[in-house]
Structure formats: C-alpha cells, structure tokens
C-alpha cells in the first residue's frame, strides 16, 4: 500500500514538474518571438526620430540583424550547455541574457552626441546580447517539451509550446498601438489623437516590455537552475557530434529546411514594413506613418492583421501534427508558400487597386508558414537525434535557421530597393521549392515513435525508485 502511495505521489510530482517546465518553455518562446520582431516596428519609429525618415538603411539593417547574429551564437552555445549542464539551468541563463538585453535596449542613446544615428550602434550591441538569450531558448524549449511528452502526443505538445511564437508576434502591434496611441510617436506631423506626445517614449516601452516575461519567470526557473548537474560523460562536443556521419542526413534535413525557411520568414517579418509600403504604394515622404487614420498608413494595424491571419496556422499544426506527421506538413507548407509567393510576384502590379486582397494573400503566406515549416522545423531536431546530443544538434539546426534569417533580413530591403518587391517574392518561392526537395529526401516521419537514444535502463530505474528528489524537475 505504501509503495502504491509513493508511486502515485511520484507520478503526480513528475506531472507537476513537467507541466511547470512546459509552461516555462512556452512563455520563454513567447518572449523570444516578441523580442525578435518588435524591432520591425521600433525601427520605423526611430527612423522618423533620428533619421528624418528612411535615410539610414544601413544602420537599420545592422540593428535588425544584430539580434539574429546573437541568436546564432546563443543557439550554438546554449544548445551544448543544455546537454552539459541540464535543460533547466541552461534555460534560466538564456532568460537572464534576454531580459538584460531587452532592458538595456530601452535605454539606448546616441553614442556620439553629434551623430543621432549612432543610437543604432548602441541598440545593435544591446540586441546582440538579447539575441544570445533569445537564441538559446529555441533548442532548450523544444527539447524540454519533447522529452516530457509521450510518443503519441509529442508533436501536439511541442507544437503547442511553439504556438506561443504567434502570440508573441501578435503582441508586437498590440503593444505598439497601446504605446503609440497613448504616448504618440514624437513626430510633429502626427494627426492621430493621442493622450500625450513624448518623443522616444513609445519605442523605449515597446523594447523594454520584452523583459517582462523573463522577469516573471525567473523565480520559477531559479529552482531548476540550482538542481544537480546531470551526468555528462556521454555528452560530446559540438564538433564531435557534427562529425558523426550517422547524423549527417538528419542534420541536412533539419538544418537545411530551417535555413531555407527562415530566409523567407524573417526576411518578411523583419522587413514587413518596407514590403507593406510597396504593396500599398504609400508615399512616405520624410517619415513613415505608423498609426495613421487609414489602413494604408497604419503600420500597426497592418502588422496586426498579418499576425492574426498567421496565428490560426499554429493551432491547425497543433491539431494535425500527430495525424499528418511533421514531414507531410512541412512539404505542404513549403508547397503552398511557393504557390502564394509566385502569385504575389506575378500579380502584384495587377492587384495594386485591391490592397485588402493583397494583404490577405500576403497574410496567407504566414498562415502556411505556421501550418508548415515554421512549426515542423522547431519539432524535428528534438526528436531526430539521441538524447546525449539532442540539445546540441538542435541548437546547431536552429543556428542554421537563424543564418538563413540573417541572409533574408540583410538582403530583402536592398533587393526591394534595387529590383522591386516582385523579385523578392520570386526569391521566396525558389527557397520554398528547395525546401520541398530537402524535406522529401532528408527528413524522416517519426510520429508515434520513441525518442531516439532513450536509455531503457534509466527509465526502468526511475520507475523502481519510489523516492522523490528535488532534482527530478531539473530536466
């Protein structure tokens, strides 16, 4: 009877610990998404304040890519830390980094008083620090969610954690509208009524509020960070893991698909304002409208509509991830993206008098990104590699994704200027077609299968041990 009671207590504690870990992973993912894309709004506000409109494209590009560069470093570093130190402690460290970076970003000032645009140098440094923490969340959140799920519902559980990215992206224009309609954008030309008009306050709040999830999570993560360090005798270095030929095909499938997808996804997300201006044929003049009275001149509403059109895609993925499988969802997602980008490239000029239709079709690219490779690339690495290298190789695949994001974010705005938005959409369609090829030949359908490399001996030992240790929650 005592054994039954202890087993029941252990099961209840295990479920509680895993639920806590999953919630932490989900909120961490929300924080990651918000902090990555809030710059696409604040850049436009800061351009108006410090550059008198779109006259500092190089500085804006550097600010946009600094966080991505930091994310690559964080993914490579904290992916390995997750295997070496434990998932919980590593996730705690990533939130410390991202919280610090977000807070410092809110206090950005020009480094050179004679050059107002030097504020973007300060912001780039702060967002690089932010990116290190943001990047580390990717492999750790996915691994925590996957390892705590059964084989029958693993896809749904990890996809549900990842869906918080959509919530984070929607929060950017929502928080932006609250701040801008309350405090204004600081521009004298502003015609929209606001409670007050304080220069610089809105973009500082939008950036600084990115620290709030981390601040709220820290008390709950601290217990995990103090847990005993796991056995690392089987944890090889990143180079050792990458040199193992047994993983090469899966690495190509997971990392390659993520790289190609993020070229399109982050290129569009970070430079959606530039694309939307061209889509709506807005003559911005000396400054970019962010809260105008019409949809064509209200960037916040445009970004909110895009986020709302894309958000259901996350939850459709949650519903079908275990039924259709990751591979099939990724193929259909890439396929629909290729078709939609081709339509946009071919008929962009012809639909110039139908801005609502253009916005809807453009929004569908986000829907099928989310009901497609955006969700699957997050899940695949966590179940394609053995436990002792799972977090490390997950981090490497995520880093290759963010490398693609750097490519997209650094090239999209110059390409729009040089060749037009239609050419950018053609490039996106080509990336999607290449993603289909990589997925077909290099991705395995592992739905319903056990996680690779789990130790049956360790699992049986945990079932036999009726005592509950605090370290049970560490991973």
Image: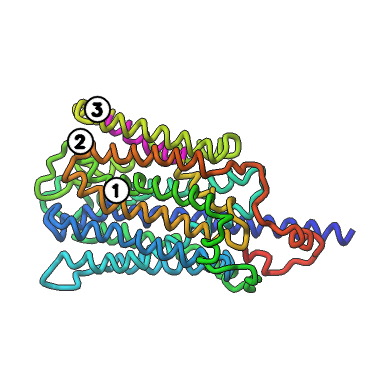
Residue, disc 1: 177
Instruction: Determine whether, in the image, residue 438 is placed left or right of residue 318.
Output: left
Disc on the earlier residue, 1 or 2:
1
Residue most extreme to the right: 1
List x then y, in percent, for residue 226.
59, 73
Q: Give the range drawn in magenta.
A: 358-372
Dot 1 falls on a residue whose secondary structure is: helix
Residue, disc 2: 280
Residue, disc 3: 347
Instruction: Determine whether, in the image, residue 67 is placed left or right of residue 438.
Output: left
Which tag is nearer the camera, tag 3 or tag 2? 3
Which tag is nearer the camera, tag 3 or tag 1? 3
Disc on the earlier residue, 3 or 2:
2
Which tag is nearer the camera, tag 1 or tag 2? 2
Q: Does 207 sit above or below residue 284?
A: below
Q: Nearer the viewer, residue 294 or 240?
A: 240
Is disc 2 surrounded by few (<14), some (14 to 19) or many (20+) residues within 10 Å? some
């Amino acid at each position: 009877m005592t054994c039954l009671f202890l087993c029941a207590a252990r099961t209840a504690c295990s479920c509680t610990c895993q639920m806590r870990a999953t919630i932490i992973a989900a909120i961490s993912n929300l924080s990651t998404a918000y902090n990555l894309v809030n710059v696409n709004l604040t850049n436009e506000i800061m351009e108006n304040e410090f550059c008198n409109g779109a006259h500092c494209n190089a500085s804006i590009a550097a600010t946009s890519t600094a966080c991505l560069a930091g994310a690559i470093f964080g993914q490579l570093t904290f992916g390995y830390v997750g295997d070496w130190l434990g998932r919980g402690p590593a996730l705690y460290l990533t939130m410390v980094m991202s919280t610090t970076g977000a807070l410092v970003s809110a206090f950005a000032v020009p480094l050179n008083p004679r050059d107002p645009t030097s504020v973007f140098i300060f912001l780039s440094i702060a967002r690089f620090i932010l990116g290190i923490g943001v990047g580390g969340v990717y492999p750790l959140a996915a691994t925590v969610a996957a390892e705590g799920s059964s084989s029958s519902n693993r896809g749904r559980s990890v996809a549900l954690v990842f869906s918080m990215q959509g919530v984070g992206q929607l929060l950017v224009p929502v928080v932006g509208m609250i701040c801008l309609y309350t405090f204004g954008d600081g521009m004298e030309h502003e015609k929209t009524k606001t409670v007050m008009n304080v220069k610089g306050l809105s973009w500082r709040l939008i950036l600084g509020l990115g620290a709030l999830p981390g601040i709220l999570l820290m008390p709950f993560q601290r217990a995990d960070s103090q847990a005993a360090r796991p056995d690392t005798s089987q944890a090889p270095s990143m180079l050792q893991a990458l040199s193992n030929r047994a993983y090469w095909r899966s690495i190509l499938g997971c990392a390659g698909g993520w790289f190609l997808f993020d070229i399109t996804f982050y290129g569009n997300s970070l430079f959606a304002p530039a694309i939307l201006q061209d889509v709506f044929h807005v003559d911005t003049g000396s400054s970019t409208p962010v809260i105008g009275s019409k949809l064509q001149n209200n960037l916040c509403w445009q970004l909110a509509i895009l986020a709302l059109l894309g958000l259901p895609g996350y939850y459709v993925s949650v519903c079908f991830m275990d039924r259709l499988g990751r591979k099939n969802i990724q193929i259909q997602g890439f396929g629909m993206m290729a078709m939609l980008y081709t339509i946009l490239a071919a008929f962009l000029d012809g639909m110039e008098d139908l801005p609502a239709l253009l916005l809807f079709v453009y929004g569908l690219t986000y829907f099928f990104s989310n009901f497609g490779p955006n969700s699957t690339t997050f899940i695949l690495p966590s179940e394609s590699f053995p436990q002792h290298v799972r977090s490390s190789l997950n981090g490497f695949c995520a880093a290759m994704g963010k490398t693609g994001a750097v490519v997209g974010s650094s090239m999209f705005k110059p390409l729009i200027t040089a060749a037009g938005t239609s050419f950018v959409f053609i490039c996106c369609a080509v990336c999607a077609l290449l993603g289909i090829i990589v997925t077909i030949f290099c991705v395995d359908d592992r739905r319903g299968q056990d996680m690779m490399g789990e130790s049956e001996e360790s699992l049986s030992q945990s079932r036999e041990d009726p005592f509950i240790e605090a370290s049970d929650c560490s991973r």
